[in-house]
Amino acid sequence: MNKLLAPLLIGLIGGGILISLGVWQLQRMAWKQGMLEAIEARIHDVPVALPASPDPEAHQYLPVRLSGTIGEPDLEVLASVRGVGPGYRVIAPFELDDGRRILLDRGFVALSAKDAPRPPVHATITGNLHWPDERDASTPVTDMERGIWFARDIEAMARVLDTEPVLVVLRESDEAVHRATPYPVSTADIPNRHLEYVVTWFGLALVWFGMTGYWIWRIRRKTD
């Protein structure tokens, strides 16, 4: 029995830790799903006017309806759409009828349409305020010579286009001719891998108990 004590303790302690991690990920998954449902409801809420001082914490995903002029020049951010392929997000200056200037993510264009003309146009739009977190240590530096950005850097883009550091991602527009395909914000872009983690931890627990059982079987076989 003394020979079985160590493997039993190791098996129970290790398995308990792995199961607790799996349970924790189950709780995290429930929390994440609730958060995504709340974000989805906010995205599709009734649009309002642009706040006087948009705040990244208080107004993230806030739906707004605005009227003004989509201007030029615009900026192109390298992107990819599932089922379509690589292309660019078009970020343009948007001057509201009251004179405020903000950034507008007009949507997606194919690689071949990068340099297509997109003249100024007055439009009433519906979209969502968004402060995307797309830059990290591995993000390439903006290629100013070719006019290619690799992330929606709101502060930098606002300086280049002389706007407020505020971005609205287009959902709908009454433009007669759409120069880009709207690529609205969605919870589909928010990673949620907790189910994968749940399966991993519980799977590891099963393997751990299996290995412990095999270890005990080997010990008992030697002592018989």
Image (spheres, rainbow, N blue to C red):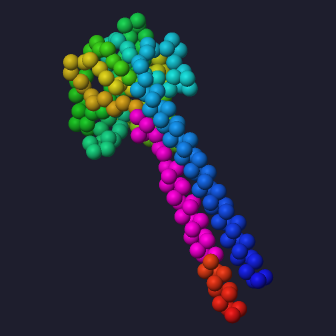
Q: Position of residue 52 (x, y in %)?
A: 51, 12
- Against 19, residue 207 (above or below) is below
2 lies left or right of 134: right
103 lies left or right of 119: right
Give the magenta range.
Answer: 186-212
User: Which quadrant holds the N terminus?
Assistant: bottom right
Q: Position of residue 40 (x, y in %)?
A: 44, 32
User: Which quadrant holds the C terminus?
Assistant: bottom right
Q: Position of residue 114 (x, y in %)?
A: 26, 32
Answer whether residue 11 is visible to the viewer in this image.
yes
Quarter location, residue 22: bottom right
- Against 33, residue 91 (above or below) is above
Q: Position of residue 217 (x, y in %)?
A: 63, 84
Q: Pick out the residue farthest to the top.
A: 98
Observer-nearest of 224 and 163: 224
Residue drawn at the location 54% of the way across and 44% of the way down? 30
129 lies left or right of 179: right
Residue drawn at the location 56% of the way across and 41% of the way down? 31
Residue drawn at the location 32% of the way across and 35% of the way down? 88
